[in-house]
Amino acid sequence: MVIRLLLPIILWLTLTDLAAAQGDTRLMILHDHGNPVVSEMVELTIRGEYDLTVSLEEMIFPNSPDYDWVQIARDDWHKERVNGRLLQIFERKVAVFPSRDGPVEIGPVTHNLTYVTEDRKRAETEVTAPAITLNVHPFPGDHRPLSARQLTLTDELSAKPGQLKQNEVLTRRVTIEAEGTLAHYLPPRPDLRQPWMISFTAPEQRETIMTEQGPLARVVWEWQLRPHTGEPAILPGTGIPWFDTANRQIEIAPLAPIPFGLAGFGSNFGAVNENGAGNGIIAAGILLLCCACGLSLMLWRRVPLHRHVLLMRLRRHLPSPHSRIMHEAAKQNDLTTLRAAAERHLRWLGLPARGFSELDRQLYAALPPPGFDALDWLAGFRKMARSETRIKESDGNGPNQRPKL
């Protein structure tokens, strides 16, 4: 009976002595980001507070298909007074990039420590930080996920692309640098191939550089371009959408279209020989040009309204196939579905994506402003879309004006 009474006391004293030998230990995962979107960098601080003399350590940070991660700074060991006690503090900075929306769990994180005991011997202990959950929002729109604090696109040309000399090669070098992301999130290289030019593509350079401000993603594309037929043409441009994590909205980095062709086209390829054949080709070209101008003038005077204008006028009087989804999403305060349906509504009307700044602040701001009413926003959005449609119809294509060809 006495042994049964003493056993809990002995066990308690044993555990107390063991805890005193090991000291107090605590490991936490800290972050201050409330509403990240897919691919946005979330900075974590893994903080350990140890009443130990640590000599060796190893941290196990779990991998997951739900996120990418990278350590962004050296480990920081220092002394700090916590609740009046001088403790050994460990801090590690880790950047996490969610690869899907919804709840994303990170952790648990385990820190294996080797420490020096009071009798100058070595012992080992394991400290674990419980897992945390990030509430990740879908990436805005139907774009490829790319989030950054800042994105810079540089387009360098070795010569004037519309005034190339015969047999001259144009080198085009495009560099994209994005702060706060990883290199594999940057877009793939665009295809510049055209039937009227010859192109050679240099190997892509893609890397992630660690800086004091965090990761910097960089990609470099380079092409050698030479006219194949020589006639003036336009090398099409493209836009690279990215989510600006500072102002919480989609931005477009433009890769501008450029004129492309030989200077003085008509004489470069026309000078076949000196017996007059070149002059015949030039005369034929001038004749074709005059015919084209005459045909354009006839079409200008006779063709009906552009089909795009007719389609827009027809759609103005038809109900949008996305109206019901927008209304139901606004009524249920489902802002993610509301934004996606509203963007599809604008595309159906042939309008650019705009008017989402207030809605995007509710979706992606860390502290959304209070008092937002989804139904009121939808009413204003529909009014804006109707106004934009009327402006688009009357912009140079009114009932008493000739259409733009």
Image: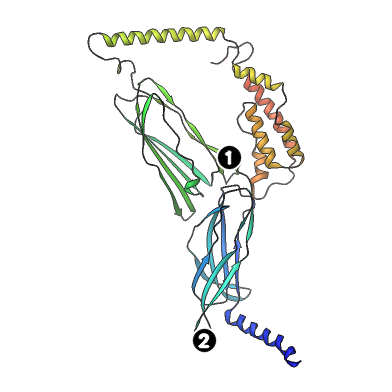
Q: Position of residue 229 (x, y in %)?
A: 35, 21
Crowd around label 2: few <14 · some 14–19 · many ≥20 (10 Å):
few
Tag 1 secondary structure:
strand
Task: Pick out the residue farthest to the left.
Answer: 274
Residue underneath mark 2: 119
Task: Pick out the residue farthest to the bottom.
Answer: 2
Q: Position of residue 256 (x, y in %)?
A: 46, 31
Tell me what residue is drawn at x 64 percent, y 32 percent: 344
Q: Nearer the viewer, residue 325 or 317?
A: 325
Give above or below for 253 relative to 280.
below
Tell me what residue is drawn at x 53 percent, y 60 percent: 93
Q: Position of residue 402 (x, y in %)?
A: 58, 11
Give above or below for 12 relative to 283.
below
Q: CA distance from mark 1 to mark 2?
A: 60 Å
Q: Quadrant of the N terminus?
A: bottom right
Residue underneath mark 1: 250
Crowd around label 1: few <14 · some 14–19 · many ≥20 (10 Å):
many
Amino acid at dot 2: Asp
Tag 2 secondary structure:
loop
Q: Position of residue 64 (x, y in %)?
A: 56, 55
Amino acid at dot 1: Ile
Give above or below for 53 relative to 215.
below
Tell me what residue is drawn at x 35 percent, y 24 percent: 228
Residue 298 — which label? Answer: none
User: Which of the two marks, 1 or 2, is nearer to us in this view?
Assistant: 2
Dot 1 or dot 2, earlier in sequence:
2
Q: Is residue 214 left or right of residue 159?
A: right
Tell me what residue is drawn at x 67 percent, y 50 percent: 367
